[in-house]
Image: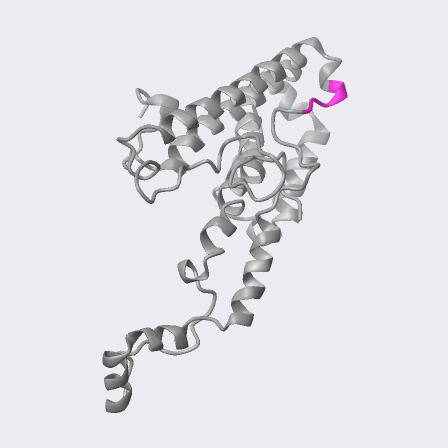
Amino acid sequence: DPNAPYGLRLTIEDYPFASDGLVLWDILKQWVTNYVNHYYPQANLIECDEELQAWWSEIKNVGHGDKKDEPWWPELNTPNDLIGIVTTIIWVTSGHHAAVNFGQYSYAGYFPNRPTIARSKMPTEDPTDEEWEDFLNKPEEALLKCFPSQLQATKVIAVLDVLSNHSPDEEYIGTNIEPFWKDEPVINAAFEVFSGKLKELEGIIDARNADCNLKNRNGAGVMPYELLKPFSEPGITGKGVPYSISI
């Protein structure tokens, strides 16, 4: 929808990942647009850049050799093509990964929310008369038999703790500028704009979490949605968008 913010109208408006993600996507795209347009002011420069074309060919044919013949691969012929490709790569390794990774412990650390194994079948699946009677009399015992054991649950919780943890030296998007970016005045200015918009996003997310009309992020028993807040402290915080995926 060209008349909607960011060119996309959400069918579900109170969808925290989508609404915050669209803002972050637009910020990333503007940064990439300024960068690409500076170094490729003419469209034909993209097709003539042999190293750039070799990079894209390697991504498709080597990095994703099993999918190299799929019809959905974008062409790399113009600056807009490059902007779309680079924005997508940055989004997948920053915003998208942060949203699906750093909230794992907050949700699945309480293992009944997301048990990793069921040790017994559903009580309605071909029960004997005795099993069915036991289930009706003590359903909580059937649930406990189905849940992971204490050892299984503890192992998963420990893994989720590691996956959801920000290291003390984590680098978040928009914080540290590369030296060669800083030496180029146009790119340095574009990065400052990029960094400033990410700080604005922090405020946008805080305001949305305080909006009592947004029931999926505000209200009794509802955790505020902060997974796409760009910056974070070390540890398990449920927020923070690093530059890339690192384990």
Q: Position of residue 174 (x, y in %)?
A: 61, 24
Vertical arrangement, residue 102 with respect to residue 26, above or below:
below
Q: Nearer the viewer, residue 118 or 30?
A: 118
Q: Position of residue 22 (x, y in %)?
A: 42, 29
Task: Specify start and end residues of the magenta stretch as a single range.
Answer: 176-180
Q: Position of residue 161 (x, y in %)?
A: 58, 53
Q: Residue at x 57, y 14 (%)?
A: 193
Residue 37 lies in quadrant:
top right
Query: Residue 218: within the magenta?
Result: no
Q: Residue at x 32, y 22 (%)?
A: 4
The scheme the figure's colours follow is one colour
Q: Residue at x 36, y 78 (%)?
A: 121
Q: Position of residue 36 (x, y in %)?
A: 61, 20
Q: Residue at x 62, y 19 (%)?
A: 35
Q: Nearer the viewer, residue 68 or 118?
A: 118
Vertical arrangement, residue 33 with respect to residue 205, above or below:
above
Left or right, residue 131 beside residue 193: left
Left or right, residue 118 beside residue 130: right
Q: Nearer the viewer, residue 155 or 193?
A: 155
Image quadrant occupied by the N terminus? top left
Number of numbered markers: 0
Majority secondary structure of the magenta segment? loop
Query: Residue 178: within the magenta?
Result: yes
Q: Nearer the viewer, residue 8 or 99?
A: 99
